Image: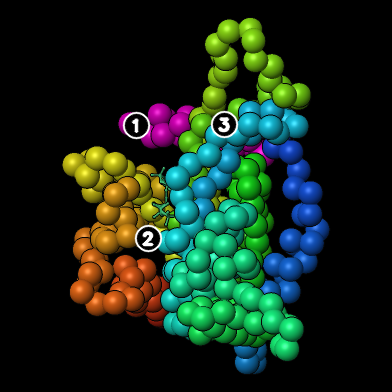
Amino acid sequence: MDVNGLQKAQEALDAEIKSFFNSAPPLRNIEDIGKDLRKFVEFNSPQAGNQSARKVVCVTSGGTTVPLEQRCVRYIDNFSSGHRGAASTEYFLKAGYSVIFLYRKGTRQPYCSLLPDDPFLECLEFTQESGIQARQPYSEAVKNAISEHHAAIANGTLLKLPFTTIFEYLQMLHLVAISMRSVGPHALFYLAAAVSDFYVPWESMAEHKIQSGSGPLDMRLVQVPKMLSGLRSEWAPMAYCISFKLETDVKILLEKADAALRKYKMHMVIANELLTRKEEVTLVTTNEKIHVRRDPKLVGDNVEEHIVKHIVKKHSAYVDNFDHKVSRA
Ligand code: PMT
């Protein structure tokens, strides 16, 4: 595409993004979210003399929904369990990062991977002598989940922000990105959420429950504008940005990841295939492709632990390079 063509494509994307945000139903608790974010970022910001300063990562996790009615009865959802985001959050915290965990309500939570699906009913029991207590064999897992989670919240290193719809997710990601500007190159985006590609614009959505009985449902879904280039160039231009590429056909996976790296100017794209995503991924950067695999023979070995180790190194090099450039200027 020539320069003219590129400029036109950019203008069209800008118009789509503007129209998405203008027509999205406003976030209900935007003031509280803004307040929590300001407090969290200020606490962790690398200003001179701040003893609590840390690198800050925004981990997105779980899938966005697409409502079909304004008073929503039905919606389109996707497969994402939130495992990748929740496990990665634990490893980032362990590596000394503070984490903004932007997650789909009801999906996997950090420190809960060893708990059963219904921990409240399965892990607790009531006895006349001691009231409510953890049952075996879960008591160790419950104790760790509670203490690690509470410590991260109390230390100001974990902020959890829930979303459900694509409208909420993208507005919240925008808010988070703008709030994280003051963290400069110490900010990292790790976009593991499975983001809807198509949606029904709010203004063309039925207000009430769509009635059945009048034949097939005819509905037009519009493409969700990709926000990745906006995030990189405008929302958080100094941050290190990592997106994911998910495919079901392994033959096109790396090619697609490479294309995303170039098109959206990501610092890294993590390529994963649906069925093997818990076993292996490839970290794609402009210079290299690092294949990362969990060792199935090692109990408790998670692919996320390896991913985060590599990212921590790459992000450190990025920050050093940034500081070096600033000191030479
Ligand atoms: O949650 P789990 O069950 O553990 O699964 C983890 C995962 C497979 C969901 C995760 O590893 C993953 O791949 N997440 C990204 C899924 C996805 O949306 O892939 P995509 O190829 O459709 O999109 C690529 C990137 O573009 C994503 O990082 C997404 O943030 C971004 N995107 C997508 C659509 C859109 N309209 N705007 C976007 O910015």
Q: Nearer the viewer, residue 32 or 230?
A: 32
Q: Residue at x 64, y 76 (%)?
A: 125
Q: Is residue 237 magenta?
A: no
- 29 displayed left or right of 136: right
Q: Earlier in the sequence, mark 1 or mark 2?
A: 1
Q: Earlier in the sequence, mark 2 or mark 3?
A: 3
Amino acid beneath label 3:
Tyr
Farthest residue in the top direction?
Answer: 214
Total count of labels:
3
Which circle marks residue 2 in the picture? 1
- Residue 157 in the image: x percent, y percent? 60, 79
Magenta segment boundaries in residue numbering: 1-21
- Residue 307 in the image: x percent, y percent? 33, 69
Q: Which of the 4 quarters of the picture holds residue 284?
A: bottom left
Closer to the eye: label 1 or 3: 3
Q: Which of the 4 quarters of the picture holds residue 192?
A: bottom left
Q: Residues within 10 Å of mark 1 (few under 14, many from 20)?
A: few
